[in-house]
Amino acid sequence: MSRSEAPRRLFDLGGQVALVTGASRGIGLACARALGRQGATVVLNGRDAATLQRAVRALRGEGIRAHSAVFDMLDIDSALEAADRAATEAGPIDILFANAGVQHRAPLMAFPLDAFQHVIHANLTAQWALGRHLAGGMLARGHGRIVFTGSITALLGRRDITAYTAAKGALHALVRQWSAELAPGGVTVNALAPGYIRTELTRALHQDASFDAWLRQRAPAGRWGEPEDLAAAVAFLASREAGFVTGQVLAVDGGLSTSM
C-alpha cells in the first residue's frame, strides 16, 4: 500500500455480494443489514414476495444495495435456479448466509415421521444443496464465505425437538467436513449456534412465562438474545479478516452453553 492510499477499513465487504436466506425478518434481516452496512450488496431471500419487498425497501432506505430473490428452500431445483438468477442480477455470490429453517415440536414418541423428514429436508438437505451449488462458483473465483445457522440445541439436548436437533447436529458436522474440502480453494465454511433468540420461530417459548423465567435465570447474560446479537458474528465470518477461520461453530448464546 502506498502512502497516498487510504487503508481499507476493517471487515470491509465492499464489492462483494451476499445471499441471505430467510431474510424477510428476524435473524436473516438483521444479518443482511449488517453485511450491507459493511459494504456488501445483499440479496434477500424469502417465500413471501410482499414481505420480502418491504425488507428490501427498508434496507435501500438505509443506503444499502439490496435485491430480492423469492424462492422456497424446500423446492431445491427452483431454489438453485433462483440463486443463479440473483447472481446474474446482483453479481456472483461471494457470501452465503444460509439462515432459513423450520421447526416442529412434539414429544419423541409422538413425533410424526413425515414431520421429521420435513424438518431434516429443510434444515439439512436444502442447506447442503444450495451451499454446494454456490460453492462451485466460489471455488472457481478462489474466494468465498459460507455461514450456516446451526443451533445451541445441537450442543445441549432439549425435549420435543428431535428432528431439529438431528438436523442441526448434522449441519455442524457438515461444516467441519466441508471445511476440509473447500478451504484449499479459498472458501471458508462456518456456522453460528444461536442460543435462545427472540424470533418468530421461538415465539411459543418467549410467550411461555415459566420458560422465560427459566432462561433469564439460566443464561449468564440474563436475557433473550436478539437478532442483532448475531449480526456482528456473521459480518466477521464473511470478512477477509476471517480467512483463517473455518470449520468452526460459534455459539452466540449469552453463555448458556458454558455454565451450569
Image: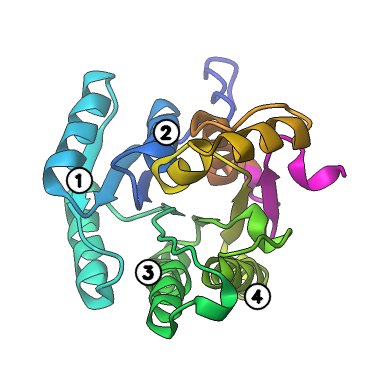
Q: What residue is at 70 percent from the left and 57 percent from the top?
A: 248
Q: What amino acid does circle 2 point to? A: Ala
Q: Secondary structure at mark 3?
A: helix
Label 1 or label 2, whichever lies nearer to me, is: 2
- The three-letter amino acid code for the residue at tag 1 is Ser
Q: Position of residue 208 (x, y in %)?
A: 53, 39
The image's mark for residue 177 is 4
Q: Residues within 10 Å of mark 4 (few under 14, many from 20)?
A: few
Mark 4 to mark 2 CA distance (whole Å) = 28 Å
Q: Are marks 1 and 4 in contact (CB under 8 Å)?
A: no
Q: As displayed, is residue 119 above or below residue 142?
A: below
Secondary element at image label 4: helix
Label 2 Cα neighbours within 10 Å, binned few <14 / some 14-19 / many ≥20: many
- Residue at 43%, 73% in the rendered image: 132
Instruction: Relative to 147, say whether 194 is above or below.
Output: above
Read off the residue under disc 3: 130
